[in-house]
Image (cartoon, grey):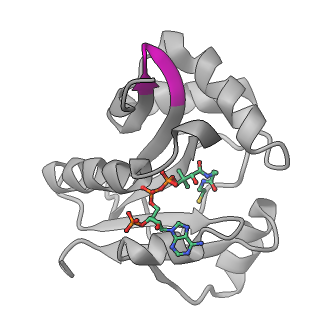
Amino acid sequence: MSKPHWRHACASELPAIIAIAARIHPDLPERAEVFAEKMRLYPDGCFALVADNEIVGYGLSHPWMQQQVPPLNGFLETLPGDADCLYVHDVAVLPDCRGGVARAYVAIIEDLARVSGIAMLALVSVYVTRPLWERFGFRPVTADAELREKLESYGASATYMLRDLADR
Ligand SMILES: CC(C)(COP(=O)(O)OP(=O)(O)OC[C@H]1O[C@@H](n2cnc3c(N)ncnc32)[C@H](O)[C@@H]1OP(=O)(O)O)[C@@H](O)C(=O)NCCC(=O)NCCS
């Protein structure tokens, strides 16, 4: 298999992306329409990981507000006009294609944020990925009661994290 590379995804690739999501996140299901809305609202933030012309992973991000977490499986409705972070909704890669791809993805969204005039990356770490994100400069943020409530839909391990692009 050729070395996987990230590139923008297009709407016709959503079925492949959704199939990977169902495989990697069986306990965090989202409706197809929720994926489609992100592609419609912010295609610039929708990336596919490709190897041998096959989609083997995806990363979805969009401008958002710090300390705010869209509910899992919920619609964004609109993007904020005064966004102060680029929120990584999810990045997931098939097991055989991992190794270096998260690092490459973070580099891509750092560039995307900078050209969009956004100085902060945000995400919700799930499973045991917190050390992985810390390695890329993300720091856990103490969640207030409102944020904790929103994190609940992401499971018990959910940690809200920010990466200040001015730091490095
Ligand atoms: C998250 C995911 C995309 C990472 O892909 P990957 O190719 O393994 O990531 P990378 O190899 O680029 O980066 C991982 C880095 O963190 C390190 N790392 C991995 N697991 C770690 C851990 N548990 N603790 C500390 N560091 C860890 C790796 O050594 C690597 O660092 P390096 O580049 O300096 O060697 C992939 O594991 C995945 O799809 N997981 C399932 C879905 C998921 O959990 N998504 C995240 C939702 S928040």
Q: Residue 98 lies in magenta, yes or no?
A: no
* x 62%, y 55%: residue: 70
Q: Depth check: 165 or 49 in front?
A: 49
* x 72%, y 51%: residue: 72
Tell me residue 23's x, y (percent). Answer: 76, 35
- The relative height of residue 43 versus residue 63 in the rendered view (above or below) is above
Tell me residue 1's x, y (percent). Answer: 45, 23
**Residue 26 visible within the image:** yes
Q: Residue 95 vs residue 10: left or right?
A: right
Q: Residue 128 vs residue 67: left or right?
A: right
Residue sticking out furthest to the front: 1
* x 35%, y 34%: residue: 6
- The relative height of residue 92 versus residue 127 in the rendered view (above or below) is above
Residue sticking out furthest to the top: 12
Looking at the rendering, the stretch of residues picked out in magenta corresponds to 50-56
**Residue 42 visible within the image:** no
Determine the image quadrant of residue 128.
bottom right
- The relative height of residue 93 versus residue 1 in the rendered view (above or below) is below
Tell me residue 119's x, y (percent). Answer: 23, 67
Q: Main secondary structure of the magenta part?
A: strand
